[in-house]
């Protein structure tokens, strides 16, 4: 493990601070299994942390939260594939917060490779690194890792359960397990007699779990096939329970106002008006904000708005211009990382044409449809917390600290998430709800943020600037020298989660920038960290969300400077470097009937980003309708390596694209007097039914490793749209959002 | 003074101030949580319900202004007896996070009641007030067309 430790210290991802001095400890930790968090009751056998079989049948404790990505259904399919039960025979619950549900894929993403060039050795190293997730108790839904993470472990869980149940039946019948079969939730005896798993559960509990090889993919019945989503009926009948839908006996409703000058102090407040407003039961001083507990959320919100608060200043420049001036200053400091540096970028090759460009993208809010909320019941010696979240173990730890309880005294119930996009990996909404509930012991209190509170108290996608220099010769790129500057959301998050300063090279800042599969002979990509205290966090596709725009807009500019078709220009640089990536470009060329020519009034743009192990190419078509520009069509091709549920992958791809297009067209968080200027959807609009393009998605499976699905659709959408607008208007989009430069349909 | 509302065919006595929006009466008082809070300013459509058959944003209708019978997502079908439009949503696997879909379905149901064969332009017009941050629009459109066809056959 020494080499792993060295790599981790050198390269760093989430939790490097928590790892300091902890690698040997981690190695010790990972050599034994984490405690089983499911404590079986009488008549139940918990065969491993994922599957529980009892008289009611088979229950899967999905360690990842369902935030729309379909994880619930696909994880059930992974179990069912080996356990021999129908998907409709499995009840899926979200597992309790527990170390046994560590995310093994997320740490693997921290390796110092570009991803697409991963060797089998490095892939194995990635898997070995994954076990460190266990030592860090990293139960996180994010990083497009759910399927990569669950693929082996869930099938292993199903296979082990099946063989252990067979052994139980074999002992009962006095036969060898090899004489038994399994089907539809039963062990089948040689004479055809059937024994339900539920009847064998208690016997199986007394046996050591059996480990067996996994079935060959050629035998799969569920995986690789599209399955009806297990959450669909609930979600179309209003019966799915989101965090905000939790209802408990005697429950009260709270609203909150935190300092809009983010991170500033609260000097005092006057709540004399609020005290006597209808429905108000209690006003709570949160230290850096106030909350009102009432008998109705709306009444609570009316009252909290009526409190006159004296807010302290924010610890960052109060205006947007000052913030971006600080970001630009980061270019003057030495680079935090240079993860790609080949050839020599210091001189422009003789006879080559040099081009330069500067790009800028704004801070962005997540704007999940369900505003932040959590429900808490504090009883003095225990705390129960209900919320949609992406990180229950971290929330449990934070809530325990807040309530001054042992973590064992805190129980987390994870509901459906009304959108996550990275926002629900944060701990603030749980901490606030805990503090509010502590003001009313014994009474469950649901704290719901207004949309305005949610929009103005986010951990924003950082604003970023890129400075690009490149050179083209004979129709090809011969040099790319790029620098990106932004706040480090990784370092800030490490500090926020662990209390320890994050440090070291930040791969997330430069993902989508340094690791793109183009064979350019002189190629250097550096990241510069801006020292600013604007709260920033993980926004769907994270660093790729700005770097995709920077890299792919610049590729387009270089193609035009080279006098070459932008799709062919990319393809020629890619073919020798990574065939699956080139295959995606070839696919969108065919799907869209790309000719490089567009009729008057139409524009088309192409872009490509390799992220989270998945190459994605997109072509976007815009149309000028009497001076207003509408996004007409989109074509997407991705290579998943292995698509466990193809239709769900398609949904994630076009959904990721729409999320990116919303940001590209309209998304911008700005600051005045230290406060966010956007309050609600009218100030922060998104793609809607009439402005969404028709879309066609093709899912390829040639890549050597399984890629993520939830995020890779987002990054290429923004440059593809910008490049299409250039094709239509001749104006280059170098700054987002695009509605400031173009007359887009709203 | 208690106000009487008829919701999904049942009478409810509600003892809340007159200016509390219907949304918060449904969610926090009556316990019908299928209708969602998204923005509070009629900009996202997540809270859409029917009053006398008309699709309205329940965050903008005060308790004292509710002028007729209220139907919510729970009132048009249940998991065991889904309405045609809900079945179309399942057939097209529309929902991702699912939070906005109650409002989308209520808006679409009102559209189909008024216009049994909506064109794409009609759908654009009727549905543009309903936001979906997961971007499920292509499947919503397909499900509306499909439901229109099924309702015509019925």
Image: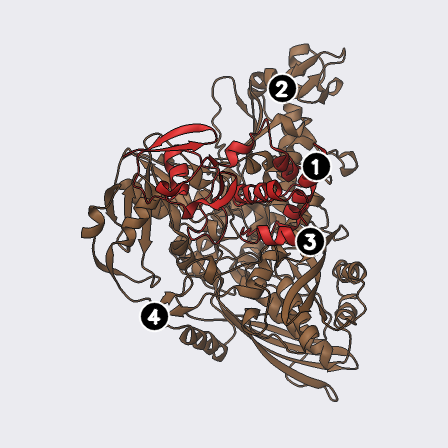
Chain colours: A brown, B red
A33 up-or-down from A304: above or below? above
From the viewer's perspective, is B84 left or right of A411?
A: right
Question: Disc 3 versus disc 2: distance between alpha carbons?
Answer: 39 Å
Q: Nearer the viewer, residue A210 or B149?
A: B149
Mark 4 vs mark 3: which is more N-terminal?
Answer: 3
Question: Disc 4 versus disc 3: distance between alpha carbons?
Answer: 52 Å
From the viewer's perspective, is A582 left or right of A660?
A: right
Query: Residue A121 bears which disc, if any?
Result: 3
Chain of residue at mark 4? A
Residue drawn at (59%, 20%), measured in percent from left and top? A204
For the residues bearing labels 1 and 2, Cβ distance under 8 angstroms: no
B114 up-or-down from A534: above or below? above
Mark 2 vs mark 4: which is more N-terminal?
Answer: 2
Mark 1 or 2: in front is 1
The x and y percentages for residue A273 are 20, 51
Query: Residue A673 bears which disc, if any?
Result: 4
Q: Callout 1: 10 Å neighbours few (<14), some, many (20+)?
A: few
Mark 3 vs mark 2: which is more N-terminal?
Answer: 3
Question: Disc 2 versus disc 4: distance between alpha carbons?
Answer: 64 Å
SS for callout 4 = loop
Is the same chain shared between marks 2 and 4? yes
Is the same chain shared between marks 1 and 2? no
Q: Callout 3: 10 Å neighbours few (<14), some, many (20+)?
A: few
């Amino acid at each position: 493990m020494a080499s792993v430790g060295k790599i981790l210290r050198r390269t760093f991802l989430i939790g490097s601070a928590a790892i300091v001095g902890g690698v040997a400890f981690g190695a010790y930790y990972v050599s034994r299994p984490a405690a089983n968090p499911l404590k079986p009751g009488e008549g139940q056998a918990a065969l491993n942390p994922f599957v529980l079989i009892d008289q009611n049948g088979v229950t899967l404790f999905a360690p990842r939260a369902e935030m729309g990505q379909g994880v619930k259904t696909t994880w059930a399919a992974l179990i069912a594939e080996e356990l021999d039960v129908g998907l409709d025979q499995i009840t899926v619950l979200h597992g309790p917060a527990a170390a046994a549900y560590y995310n093994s894929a997320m740490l693997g993403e921290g390796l110092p490779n570009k991803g697409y060039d991963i060797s089998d050795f490095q892939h194995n190293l990635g898997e070995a690194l994954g076990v460190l997730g266990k030592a860090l108790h990293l139960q996180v839904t994010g990083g497009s890792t759910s399927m990569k993470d669950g693929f082996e472990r869930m099938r292993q869980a199903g296979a082990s359960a099946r063989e252990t149940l067979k052994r139980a039946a074999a002992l009962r019948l006095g036969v060898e397990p090899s004489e038994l079969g399994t089907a539809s939730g039963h062990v089948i005896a040689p004479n055809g007699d059937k024994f339900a798993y539920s009847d064998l559960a208690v016997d199986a509990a007394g046996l050591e779990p059996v480990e067996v090889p996994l079935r060959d993919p050629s035998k799969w019945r569920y995986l690789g096939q599209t399955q009806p989503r297990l959450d669909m009926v609930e979600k179309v009948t209003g019966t799915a329970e989101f965090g905000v839908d939790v209802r408990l006996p005697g429950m009260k409703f709270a609203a909150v106002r935190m300092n809009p000058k983010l991170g500033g102090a609260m000097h005092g407040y006057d709540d004399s008006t609020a005290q006597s407003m209808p429905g108000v039961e209690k006003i709570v001083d949160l230290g850096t904000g106030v909350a009102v507990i009432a008998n109705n959320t709306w009444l609570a919100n009316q009252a909290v708005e009526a409190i006159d608060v004296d807010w302290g200043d924010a610890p960052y420049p109060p205006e947007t211009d000052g913030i971006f001036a600080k970001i630009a200053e980061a270019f003057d400091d030495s680079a935090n990382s240079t993860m790609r540096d080949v050839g020599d970028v210091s001189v422009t090759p003789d006879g080559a044409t040099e081009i330069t460009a500067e790009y800028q993208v704004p801070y962005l809010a997540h704007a999940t449809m369900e505003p932040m909320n959590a429900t808490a019941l504090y009883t003095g010696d225990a705390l129960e917390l209900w919320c949609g979240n992406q990180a229950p173990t971290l929330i449990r730890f934070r809530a325990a600290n807040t309530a001054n309880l042992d973590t064992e005294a805190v129980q987390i119930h994870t509901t459906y998430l009304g959108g996550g996009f990275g926002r629900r990996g944060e701990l603030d909404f749980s901490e606030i709800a805990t503090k509010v509930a502590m003001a009313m012991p014994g009474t469950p209190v649901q704290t719901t943020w207004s949309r305005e509170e949610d929009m103005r108290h986010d951990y924003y996608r950082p604003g970023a600037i890129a400075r690009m220099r490149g050179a083209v010769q004979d129709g090809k790129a011969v040099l790319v020298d790029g620098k990106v500057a932004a706040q480090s959301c990784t370092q800030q998050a490490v500090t926020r989660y662990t209390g320890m300063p994050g440090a070291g090279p930040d791969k997330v800042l430069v993902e989508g920038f340094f690791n793109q599969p183009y064979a350019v002979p002189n190629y250097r990509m550096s990241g510069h960290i801006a020292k600013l205290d604007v709260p920033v966090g993980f926004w769907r596709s994270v660093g790729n969300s700005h770097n995709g725009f920077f890299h792919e807009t610049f590729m387009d500019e270089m193609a035009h400077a080279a006098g070459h078709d932008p799709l062919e220009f990319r393809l020629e640089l890619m073919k020798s470097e990574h065939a699956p990536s080139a295959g995606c470009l070839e696919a969108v060329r065919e799907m869209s009937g790309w000719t490089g020519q567009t009729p008057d009034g139409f524009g088309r743009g192409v872009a490509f980003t390799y992220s989270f192990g998945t190459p994605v190419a997109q072509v976007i078509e815009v149309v000028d309708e009497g001076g207003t520009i509408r996004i007409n069509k989109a074509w997407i091709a991705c290579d998943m390596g292995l698509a466990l549920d193809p239709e769900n992958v398609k949904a994630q791809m076009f959904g990721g694209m729409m999320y990116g297009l919303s940001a590209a067209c309209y998304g911008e968080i700005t600051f005045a007097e230290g406060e966010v200027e956007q309050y609600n959807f009218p100030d922060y609009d998104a793609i809607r039914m009439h402005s969404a393009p028709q879309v066609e998605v093709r899912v390829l499976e040639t890549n050597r490793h399984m890629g993520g699905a939830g995020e890779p659709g987002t990054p290429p959408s923004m440059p593809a749209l910008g490049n299409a607008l250039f094709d239509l208007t001749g104006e280059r989009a170098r700054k987002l959002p695009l509605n400031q430069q173009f007359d887009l349909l709203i | 003074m208690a106000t009487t509302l008829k919701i999904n065919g049942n009478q409810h006595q509600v003892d809340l101030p007159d200016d509390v929006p219907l949304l918060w009466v449904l969610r926090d008082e009556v316990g019908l949580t299928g209708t969602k809070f998204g923005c509070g300013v009629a900009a996202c459509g997540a809270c859409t319900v029917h009053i006398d058959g008309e699709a309205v944003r329940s965050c903008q209708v005060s308790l004292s202004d509710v002028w007729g019978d209220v139907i919510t997502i729970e009132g048009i079908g249940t998991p065991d007896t889904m309405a045609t439009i809900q079945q179309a949503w399942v057939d097209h696997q529309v929902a991702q996070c699912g939070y906005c879909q109650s409002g989308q379905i209520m808006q679409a149901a009102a559209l189909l009641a008024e216009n049994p064969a909506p064109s794409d332009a009609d759908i654009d017009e009727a549905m543009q007030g309903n936001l979906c941050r997961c971007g499920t629009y292509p499947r919503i459109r397909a499900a509306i067309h499909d439901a229109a066809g099924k309702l015509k056959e019925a």
